[in-house]
Image (spheres, rainbow, N blue to C red):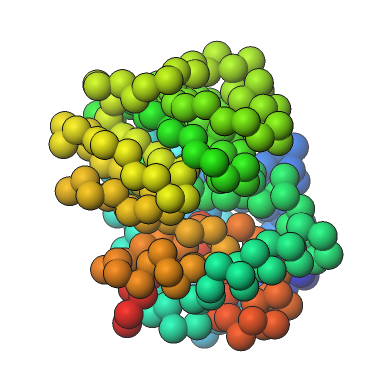
Amino acid sequence: MEEYFERRMKFVTQGGSINGILKGFDEENEVFKIIINKEEFNLDVNDVLEMIPDSFTSDSLTSDTTSKTTSTNKTTSDTTGKTTSTSDTTNKTTSSIDLLVNQSQYNEILSLAFTKFGPTREEFVLCGAQNLLKLLRLLLKDSSNKIDIVLGDNSLYNSIGLTLARLSLLHGFDVRVVGNFEDIESLKYLFIFKQNGGSHSSRVRTTTDFIVNTSEDKEIEVDESVGGVVSFGVPSTHPVSYLVCFGASIYEKVKDRDYFYLIDVMIPEKIYCQYKLTRLGMRPAKKIKPNA
């Protein structure tokens, strides 16, 4: 995140676009500090659908942006509600020609991030879960409330799933974590989830509205009455299914998909450049066509 401080940015919200200079990020209050026409404003991070560096957009700071900033000091959406409106987060489709890597390269990218350039593992997990939650709130129907998150064998993905479960609780969802795991790293996330009132079970509810499968290689049987399935690894055969990748897309997993969603986890540009990857702005989730 720090590499974007003092840079001109375009912030896309449900109410329109705001152009300004990013001065900082207040983690405690979850607000961006931005400068517009020499005045500082706070912008709620939950209202931001996309952040685009000035070098990626032809938009400039003009006087008409000031009219859009009057609401930036206020919360513009109910954080306990869900929206069914369509946004740039889900509608824009991007070619993945510069976004594909193999499994070995993906592991190298994670290693560079976690040990040298950032984000740390904890930051990766939190950012991935927050941006996935934004996507889920757009994919879910207005009446959907129950989410079952199925754990797998990947410690990193389990951590994201458990953090997603905790955040979903805070946003008013009825969330259940399903499955057992042996990795110690995920236990602390499960503990925190339970301390917030979360439920842990051995099986998916027959009445659940939506399922998130964090497993890399195991598909789960899902009744067609379920509203949809989000998978981290193996795509579901459910009629309404979505595949997500974090930071970069692994070719072997996405090659046969019509599209998938790439979740932003704040991997720095210097890592992307090392693998000749292109970062197209900072949308929480980008819709990608793997063969475009």
Question: Residue 254, image x and y in percent?
Answer: 38, 67
Which of 192 and 130 lies nearest the eye of the viewer?
Answer: 192
| Residue 265 to residue 151: above or below | below
The C terminus: image quadrant: bottom left
* 225 relative position to 197: left or right: left
Question: Residue 282, image x and y in percent?
Answer: 56, 66
- Say whether residue 74 is visible: no
Residue occupying the point 43% across, 50% down: 217
| Residue 115 to residue 129: above or below | below
Residue occupying the point 27% across, 30% down: 209
| Residue 99 to residue 32: above or below | below
Residue occupying the point 66% across, 23% down: 192
Which of 167 and 184 lies nearest the eye of the viewer?
Answer: 184
Which of 18 and 211 lies nearest the eye of the viewer?
Answer: 211
Question: Residue 278, image x and y in percent?
Answer: 56, 80
Question: Residue 276, image x and y in percent?
Answer: 61, 85
Residue occupying the point 70% across, 27% down: 188
* 87 relative position to 37: left or right: left
- Say whether residue 77 is visible: yes
Which quadrant would residue 211 be assigned to in this image?
Answer: top left
The N terminus: image quadrant: bottom right
Which of 40 and 78 lies nearest the eye of the viewer?
Answer: 78
The single residue placed furthest to the right in the displayed view is 116
| Residue 155 to residue 3: above or below | above
